[in-house]
Amino acid sequence: MDALMQFILSGFTVGAVYALVALGFTIIYNASDVVNFAQGEFVMLGGMITAFTYAAGLPLPLAGLLAIVITAAVGVALNKLAIEPARGAPVVSLVIITIGASIFIRGVAQLVFDKQLHRFPAFSGDDPIHILGATILPQSLWVIGGAVFVFVGLWAFFTKTLTGKAVLAAANNRLAAQLVGINTNWVMTLSFSLSAAIAALAGVLITPITLVSYDVGVALALKGFAAAMLGGMGNPKGALVGGIALGLMEALTAGYISSQYKEAVAFVVILAVLFAMPQGLFGAKSTERV
Amino acid sequence: MKLMTTTALAMLATFGLATAASAEIRLGASLSATGPAAFLGDPEAKTIEMLVEELNAKGGINGEKIDLTLYDDGGDPNKARTFATRLIEDDEVVAIIGGTTTGTSMSILSVAEDEGIPFISLAGAIQIIDPVKDYVFKTPHTDRMACEKIFDNMQKNGITRIGMISGTDGFGASMQAQCKDVAGDYDIEILADEIYGPSDADMTPQLTKIKNTEGVQAILNPGFGQGPAIVTRNASQLGIGLPLYQSHGVASDSFIELVGPEASEGVRLPGTALLIADILPEDDIQRDVVMDYKTAYEDKYNQNVSTFGGYANDAFLLMVNAMEQAGGEDPDAIRDALEATDGLVGTTGVYTMGPDNHLGLDLSAFRMLEIENGGWTSID
């Protein structure tokens, strides 16, 4: 029982990390059908900038905020410099541009920062919280809380606000959206800045648990992408559920079967789900009234 | 810069002004200053550059300055092979230091062996020097030696049954295999054998399994990078209370910083004298060498020394020592002098090479260390 509880708490800890990264994919995907593979690098920037500004003497909340703002600006720059000039290119070309951007950001990061691992203190200390004979670190609760907060925010944004609906409209039919007066360029800029800000927030929240170095983005993006595919690309609910499900599968496989198979089991389950439901668990229907 | 020097020399030679004293010893290096192994290659590259600068400022070897050509192979074995060829054919070096990873070392050594150029590798795997290859030497301990050192300490503490949790990165997987291989020699029984991915965020499930395995007296974690730091924090979070042994892969001050003084309390690992430079006794044979390197590096680069930079430091010491004996002209003479190295004190240990031993370290090169109050203590 104690062991099961520990596996579940571990699954939630890891799953919330995946979910936070997966949520970051949502907005850009909804605005342009592009899966932004530089998402992992935005997470890395969030963690790295916080670690460095904190080490330089800034208070932690301010360092985190600064990291989110700077990363959002990097997101806007990516859109302005690389995505917008390629407008009209097929989605695949845009995805390849984001892969290039991710390699570029990684290269710049190792020059601007360094190649070592970094960490900053957990927000509420390192004393584990005991639940039914198992333990969880307070920082994990921050990550889980962060994922839920971002999920609620995104859900409200896409369903309750005019701006959110404009984003969906711009993705659905660019020309039609322009005809009804939506500034599609502005929508893209907004999407990139919000996506980058969410990813940076993820970086700020997870770094005390996972540590950060210039090259952590790739693995994070891969797991976040898998979680988003499992839940349904572009759906905040899917990102949250997909992330937690992936984390729980890994933890329970490691605990009850073998740590040798934890990645394999998770990916086999994802493949099985995608065979049965190509859109993922909560995937968007192909047409939608906004 | 190099181009400038060459041009200047060429001009001097043209005008008949070049004297024999300005002859230079060409030394080559291919390291992984960027890429996945940058964590090791970066301090190695910085160390070599610093040492060449220092030596040239002192007037070089027998009055001849060292002309260093350093390439960054990014941890890619194919690039390393290309650079090794370029170093030998275009840059005409007489010796090579490098090979941050086992993969890049294997590439460079095949070229060096074919061309007859002495090569000192900075990578861990035993395959590099076993079987012995004529022109290939290395400075780091093998992971097998680390396993032996750890099991030796376990034996002294009456530990016979352990649980292992290893990273799946190259370092972790290789050391895991070596430890399983030598465990029997020390009457150690491995009751649990878990793994984790190099970018995993939480290892509590694996540690919980080990904790719940009947009879486990200690945990051993071969691994590298962030994994061991997270394992150590998780072990403290779960309150396992068993001795935790880490590998030499995390032997650096930054490990304690990442884990935090509370969670790292009592962690044991085999490290080099470099880590405990400040607490080495006055009469310790390695004290001077270690202190020299540590002060020079930390003053110049403002970051903590690491074991890896130490490997590069030792490779350079070996090379310079061999060149002093053999002159900087003839690769074969340098090779013979390297093989004849006897009692050279480095930061890693004392090197005594021989025709059938191209590493030259024994277990005394490892110090068993324990983390206490956020610092290192020696428990040998």
Image (cartoon, coloured by chain):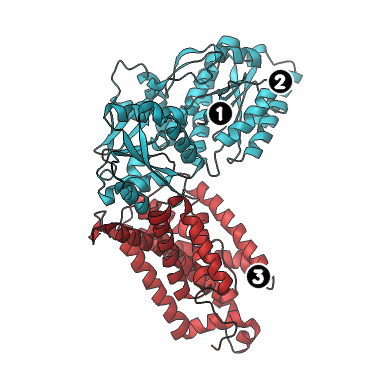
Q: Is residue B210 above or below residue B128?
A: below
How many angstroms separate mark 2 from mark 1 (CA)?
46 Å
Whether labels 3 and 1 share one chain: no
Whether labels 2 and 1 share one chain: yes
Q: Which quarter of the rendered picture does the C terminus of chain B lie within?
A: top left
> Dot 3: few (<14), some (14–19), or many (≥20) neighbours within 10 Å?
some
Instruction: Name the residue tied to disc 2.
Output: B12
User: Chain B hue?
Assistant: cyan
> Dot 2: few (<14), some (14–19), or many (≥20) neighbours within 10 Å?
few
Identify the residue shown where x is 34% and y is 53%.
B204
Percent of width and height locating residue A258: 43, 52
Indicate the secondary structure of the residue bearing disc 2: helix
> Marks 3 and 1: which is nearer the front?
1
Identify the residue shown where x is 52% and y is 31%.
B125
Instruction: Name the residue tied to disc 1.
Output: B127
Instruction: Name the residue tied to disc 3.
Output: A91
**Amino acid type shown at disc 3:** Val
How many angstroms separate mark 2 from mark 3 (CA)?
59 Å
The answer to whether mark 2 and mark 3 are in CB contact below 8 A is no
**Amino acid type shown at disc 2:** Leu
**Amino acid type shown at disc 1:** Gln
Percent of width and height locating residue A281: 50, 74
Is residue B129 toward the left or the right of residue B183 in the image? right
> Marks 2 and 1: which is nearer the front?
1
Is residue B274 toward the left or the right of residue A183 in the image? left
Percent of width and height locating residue A59: 31, 57
